[in-house]
Amino acid sequence: MEASAGIKSKCSEFTLAAVSELSSSPASSSSTPVTAWFSSDRGVAELRFCQDSKFIDGFSFDLGTSQLFKLGPVQSLCISENSDCIKENLYSRGVTIEFRNEEESRDFHSAFEQWQNEDVTQGKSLPNGTISAVRSKFDNKIESSSAKMYFHYYGQLLHQQNMLQDYVRTGTYYAAVIENRVDFTGRVVVDVGAGSGILSLFAAQAGAKHVYAVEASEMAEYARKLIAGNPTLGQRITVIKGKVEEVELPEKADILISEPMGTLLVNERMLESYIIARDRFLVPDGKMFPSIGRIHMAPFSDEYLFVEIANKALFWQQQNYYGVDLTPLYGSAFQGYFSQPVVDAFDPRLLVSPPMSHVIDFNEVKEEDLYEIDIPLKFIASVGTRVHGLACWFDVLFNGSSVQRWLTTAPGAPTTHWYQIRCVLSQPIYVMAGQEITGRLHMIAHNAQSYTIYLTMSAKMWGPGAEQGGILQTSSCKLDLKEPYYRMSQPQPYTTAQDQQPHQLLQAQDIPIHTEDLDEPELLQQPLENSGAQLQ
């Protein structure tokens, strides 16, 4: 099989466990191993499936009009657009692909995207400042309806005002730039996702030679107005409307500046665009503001929050609601409320142990590394209490030549518009002081610009003989980072974790909850290596 020169180095053949058409017709389904082939014919990248050395009829996909979605750790869905229905975003056919293990699934997804990107960009030369008319990398991985809502949201001034009035955020960016004038003076800067253009103006204040403000939403027009209204700075700023995945710039950048952080650092998946901008525009050894991000995690105990969430489902316990028994839906409603991460500010005294952290180096990380983030958890409980879940926050580093500054969203620090986030277990676990808590935080990106979160927490045997003992309690949950519960309350004067008493009217262990929809029964079988660094 021949491959084009630009993609010879990528893997072209994969052995699969099975592949079947969505119609589930027995004639088009295979239970024996099949082979997936990537190839390029006359500049068109294709995916075909082969069994017994013969290509399977009808199982051929043009990568330029196909999408690949992850259904589970070892299962994916490949769908092909109907060329006659592109405007309606309809799809003509699809196949379900079963992989032999998770590693092969990740490798296949990476190869699919590489071949697809080669197909999109091969042989196309774009003038500076123009945008490709074909589907971009962003379009291929993000659902169009999600992207439309996302750019509509950030195209409104009231939402930009909300971020500008976050003085911790805006003030830290201003200080990081102005205190490091030596990094900006006489340099070319690219502002990734410029929004109102405020960071571009900061860069110009710091003496940047020229700033390219790239913004895909309608906010680009407001940015032009704001920059034009500051002519002394604006003469060194060019606003380019478009996605960083699509636009072309007339020169390379010495510095990238951006505010790509979402809830839990990675929500909205803009970090991937920041990394793509790095690969496309940044000179070797160029600087990134920010350059490092850290996700911090610690178990917490909060009886009030747990009862608040659990009580939301009490509506479905009514047996005579206008003559209708609602109780058949109680279990589903209960689990549904616990599938929402809670976004609010909380008292750090609710934490049950010192936090650990997972580091993402924006200078080194690959875009594909952000598609799936797997963090082994290991804590030592400081108090004896009920653990209700995992609390998370993040910080980012501006590694300037003169001054290093951290922007933090930690509990106890001045509150930002990101607040903190908590993943609440529907079944709390009990721990004693000194007991080890282990688990796994597994986040898988989806095409609605967010992540599905799989959380497992376990309490290990404690006391004499613990080294020979195993797991005493385990609790798991599946959450959608796209659909949080915005509690938004300021920290309450709660008692410390060890002084909280379980609510007498609600015993979580008595509530029958079905967790077969977690889709990851093998979570506990995975080795738990402490890849996180202890936060000093």
Image: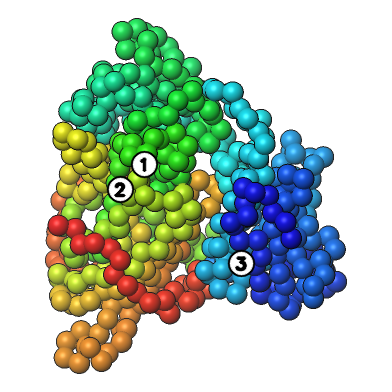
Give the label, 2 or 1, closer to the camera: 2
Residue 500 seen: no
Give the vertical position of 452 relative to 276 (above or below).
Answer: below
Give the vertical position of 71 relative to 175 (above or below).
Answer: below
Q: Position of residue 210 (x, y in %)?
A: 36, 19
Query: Which residue lies at the image location 33% right of the left edge and 36% below the top edge?
Result: 286
Front in this rendered view, residue 506 or 370: 370
Query: Which residue lies at the image location 79% right of the left edge and 72% below the top edge?
Result: 53
Q: In the rendered view, does 529 fall on the left or right side of 105?
A: left
Residue 184 seen: yes
Q: Amino acid at mark 1?
A: Met
Mark 2, residue position: 293
Q: Position of residue 438 (x, y in %)?
A: 30, 73
Q: Which mark is residue 261?
A: 1
Mark 2 / mark 3, whichever is N-terminal: 3
Give the label, 2 or 3, closer to the camera: 2
Mark 2 and mark 3: Cα distance apart in space = 30 Å
